Image (cartoon, grey):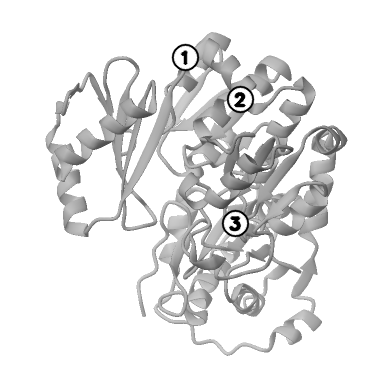
Amino acid sequence: MTKIKFGTDGWRAIIAKEYTVDNVKRVAYATAQWVKKHPELNQRIVLGFDCRFGGRMFAEASACVFAKAGLKTLLADEFVSTPMVSLGAHHFQAALGIILTASHNPPSYNGYKVKATFGGPASPQVISEIEDLIPDQYTEALDDFSVYKEQGLIESIDLDTLYLEAVEKGFDLAAINDNIKLAYDAMYGSGQSIIKKILPKAAYLHCDFNPSFMGQAPEPIHKNLLEFSKLLNENEELEVGLANDGDADRIGMYNSKGDFIDSHHLILLLIHYLHKIKGYTGKVVIAASVTDKVKKLCDLYNLPYEITRVGFKYIAGKMVEDDVLIGAEESGGIAVKGHIPERDGIWVGLLLFEYMAKTGKQLQALIDELYALVGPFFYKRNDLHITEALKLAALEKCKAGITQFGDFKVLNEDNTDGFRYTFDNEQWLMIRASGTEPVLRIYSESADEAGADKILAAAEATLL
């Protein structure tokens, strides 16, 4: 049996290779044992699955393991998003929420994410404790799924309706649906069902059930959304586009011209809307890879801010402990005040649609208003798929100390997560190994695209 380890955001593995029914049972058993070690928690689990191959099969196998251990399982009756399971865990005050998803990974993967009672990612400590309980194999005899259901140990729940009710309370949907011509790309992911109930007038793309994802990783970045970009560019009626990843906890967005709007701009827009327009207050918590323009805007608005390691579980912990206005990652994972402490690509998209509807302004006009406050900037990220030896050698160079990348002299180095180098003119570079994939990520920011490209080229030349 293989050793099962959780990465930055859950356990992910290739279906039929490491991600098998037997291995999922091992993780489910460890989860059940952890819950039983905490009798102060309600001895029940909210369980869901996304659109990936075998999702229902893996979920039913997990539910049977939980039932065998004497735990009540509240199982989503259809595929759901990760935020819907997190909301369910909080609503039903379950000991844990479990969502079987590999998020934005390629279609050959599936995964296992653990959510806490408060409605966000379980803490690193909880994950570590569950990992330590994973047995080398799971050999207990299980009854059929139908037997446990008849016994009442497994119960079907409707998370779609629960989520829809929260959305209807949280947003002026009439203003959004009646005033904005919008498009939605589910990337064949689990946002496709609920979004049709929330935004019935939208133009839909890739909103049908297709576990193969047409061979593409459902990550909402521009290179994966070219068809969506073309749709926005060629359809003069469409004003804005929203895309979500495979489990709908991340966001990608396009303006009316089909230009991709990265998460850094979205984070700034949300801070401005939530604080300056809606009057909310609280701390801004961002991962180390997010633009420094956030700090600049927070200083303008006298909002406190905090920088964490990459991984939303670190941000969620701050949101539970403190009064947080927004918690956000560079990768499109954003959580906001007034909702659960969880990334939610649909909820955040609705906030931005509401911002447009209430102001009567296009997305680009709102961004131009931001530039007047913090200045223009361009952010870029390259994911280098290199050998493990090259990746480790690059990291060793960083550890040894680098004072110059081509023409860019290092003014400051920060090691909150990976290696972040600050240059002059508000330019910066970050180098970090992925926690879930065999990838070395390099990030850059400058005033324009040419500057960001130049920093990335200098980094590759120095490291490889």
Asked whether 200 or 44 is in front, the reply is 200
The residues tagged by marks 1 and 2 sit, at their Cα atoms, a distance apart of 14 Å
| Closer mark to the observer between disc 2 and disc 3 | 2
Label 1 crowd (10 A; few <14 / some 14-19 / many >=20): few
User: Which residue shows up at 64% across the image and 43% down it?
Assistant: 234
Place of residue 341 in the rendered image (x, y in percent of width and height, measured from the top left): 62, 40
Q: Earlier in the sequence, mark 2 or mark 3?
A: 3
Residue to which mark 3 is pinned: 187
Residue to which mark 1 is pinned: 375
Place of residue 455 in the rendered image (x, y in percent of width and height, measured from the top left): 27, 30
Asked whether 339 or 462 is in front, the reply is 462
What SS does tag 1 mark?
loop
Place of residue 76 in the rendered image (x, y in percent of width and height, measured from the top left): 73, 66
User: Which residue shows up at 76% across the image and 20% down it?
Assistant: 359
Question: Horizontally, is 72 left or right of 249 in the view?
Answer: right
Task: Residue 214: give its label.
Answer: none
Total marks in image: 3
What's under tag 1, amino acid-wise? Gly
Which image quadrant is residue 303 in? top right
| Closer mark to the observer between disc 1 and disc 2 | 2
Place of residue 390 in the rendered image (x, y in percent of width and height, measured from the top left): 17, 53
The residues tagged by marks 1 and 3 sit, at their Cα atoms, a distance apart of 32 Å
What's under tag 2, amino acid-wise? Gln
User: Which residue shows up at 68% across the image and 48% down it?
Assistant: 184
What SS does tag 3 mark?
loop
What's under tag 3, amino acid-wise? Met
What SS does tag 2 mark?
helix
Label 3 crowd (10 A; few <14 / some 14-19 / many >=20): many
Q: Earlier in the sequence, mark 1 or mark 2?
A: 2
Residue to which mark 2 is pinned: 364
Question: Horizontally, is 398 left or right of 232 in the view?
Answer: left
Asked whether 316 or 208 is in front, the reply is 208
